[in-house]
Amino acid sequence: MTEIAQAEAPSPVRESNFRREARRAARGMIDARWPVFALAFLTLAAIAAAFGPLLAPFDPNRQNLALRLADPMAAGPDGTVFWLGSDALGRDVFSRLLYGARVSLLVGIAAIAVGGTLGIVAGLLSGYFGGWVDDLIMRLGDIQLAFPFILLAIMFLVVLGSGVWNLILVLGVGQWVTYARIVRADTLSLREKEFVEAARALGDSTPSIIFRTILPNILAPLTVIASFNVASVILSEAALSFLGLGVPPSVPTWGSMLAESRDTLIANKWWLAVFPGVAIVLTVLSFNILGDWLRDFLDPRLRERT
Amino acid sequence: MGSYILRRLLQSVIVVIGVTLVSFLALQASGDPTYLFVSERASAEEIEATRQALGFDRPLHVQYLSFVRDLTRGDFGQSLSYRQPAMDIVLEALPATIELTLFSMIIALLFAIPLGILAAIHRGTAWDGSITTLSMLGQSIPNFWMGIMMILFFGLYLRWFPISGHVPFLAPLLDGDFGTAVTNLPRTLFHLILPGIAVGTYSLARNTRLIRSSLLEVLEQDYVRTARSKGLAEFRVLVHHALRNAWLPVVTIVGLEFGFLLGGVVVVETVFSYPGIGRLLFAAINQRDIPLVQAGVILLAGVFILLNLVVDLVYVRLDPRVKLAGGRG
């Protein structure tokens, strides 16, 4: 992802007609084809996450020991069907997948909200004030990047204990440096621009200049980073859940489903291992495709290169 | 150049201090770390005794200083589950982890370089399209799931490769037992193939994209056009003019790569029951063996920091501009 971070140039927000831009976006998306599929899949995943309890044919935690390890499409209790089979405790895999979308999407997006906010504020302060503030913030970032992130996450989660909020906090804090660096660079270049000078001359307060004059002009490229970042956070969440550091065992997640699937791998219960993985790959791939498309859309010059 | 190296060394020292501070604070984040070291049924007296024995009743800065002093002596405390010094256990598992990390790094670079070059010189064709699409897919697959799928297909269905275990190569080599190391090597590699691919896929995909875009950028430069217009063969242009300069970003990522791969190794080792630090960490996490987790994390971070330092120093040799600017890229 670093290549994107470096290639990103600040593109000033044009005072353009919103509807015209939206039309251009829609047309570009349809031409590129893949982003349409990506968006469609993510919409489905979001619906699954939001309305999981209404859509799921079973309670995801309801055990049915008589119908353990049922094949996909096998008959369930009372004329129902286990579309994607059942697990070692007789729980419906499809229902658990639907519930799993919740944790993945919630953690992915919330962690980016936390990390993005932290990073944007840090980057604005760093770029606008410079001096020791800048030094302090950037060196802090250097230290964090010198530390393999997953190790940091493991250490804090072991001590803090598992749970959605701890997961969001740890994964969010893991992301701030990327945003801070980009925002800092953009702020540095905007700080001397005439419109910022004008705001200063008009007597605007410093917070108002930072948040109302500079901030809106640096947001666009951040959406690209955010899209790629959601993808990598979802991967990290899956890995941490797989290690047993995610959410409590009563909450189904794709990562923990994969962890459980290992016990029945030798017995060739492939569906337990295949479906949650496919769900992760499709979700992550969709965010990556959208990020790629968004980058092209916001800065067509980059299409040539990357 | 001397001042650059000095500054870079100083930076590494600061990072190491940062790492120890973070590992120390992580313990305190739970409120009272004493509870991490006693069983749930411990009486108030036992808790108080443990607190005093481990020194958690002292002021924080005193605790930190003694923590660092112990670290410099290689003392990471006793593992709670093994009843042995935590560092000894971790060090014993380190060679296996290094083998896996290096192997996956070789996979990630060995295939990424030709694929990236192929995509760049055939830019816009079906070659380019399929390589770019596959790279994006490769960057979307969780490494541990890749491992599980390979176990299912190559291990259990086709029965081509072993699905678990490890044959040591580095460990006998370090003991000076050269003969055993060499005899073991083929089997070592055989056991590394599936986990190595699982760990390396993400990096392979990312490096392919990086090499492609780096090369595309260089191919647009004036000196490449000059070389072409001199009538040099395309192969010569590519090797002598373009690749030489496309290397630099690749060297930078190799260092960062190692840390990233280490992160992947931690998870994938668990999948393949591979006896390295990752599986050790996984067991330690489940048993809440804090000293062991700390020792593993700090050791891996230390390896990572050291490698980054080495990579940066190599970079200075490769790119003369760094010497002049006195800073990184």
Image (cartoon, coloured by chain):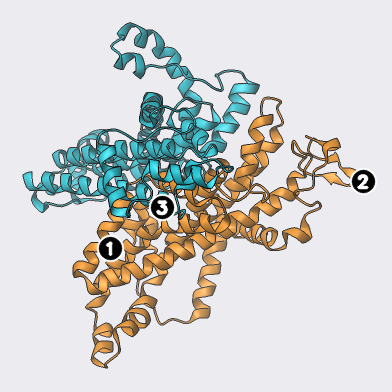
Q: What residue did someone put label 2 on?
A: A79
Q: Amino acid at mark 3?
A: Gln
- Where is residue A137 drawn, in percent x and y? 28, 63
Q: Which shade is chain A?
A: orange
> In the visual, does B14 lie left or right of A16?
left
Secondary structure under the numbered disc 3 in the rendered image: helix
Q: Are marks 2 and 1 on the same chain?
A: yes
> In the visual, does A46 lie left or right of B269?
right
- Where is residue A4 drawn, in percent x and y? 37, 55
Distance between the alpha carbons at the discs numbered 2 and 3:
54 Å
Chain letter of the residue beneath label 2 in the structure image: A
Q: Judge by depth and name the residue closer to the eye, A18 or A206.
A: A206
Where is B1 relative to A107, above or below? above
Q: Which mark is residue B28?
A: 3
Q: What residue did someone put label 1 on?
A: A137
Q: Amino acid at mark 2?
A: Gly
Distance between the alpha carbons at the discs numbered 2 and 1:
61 Å
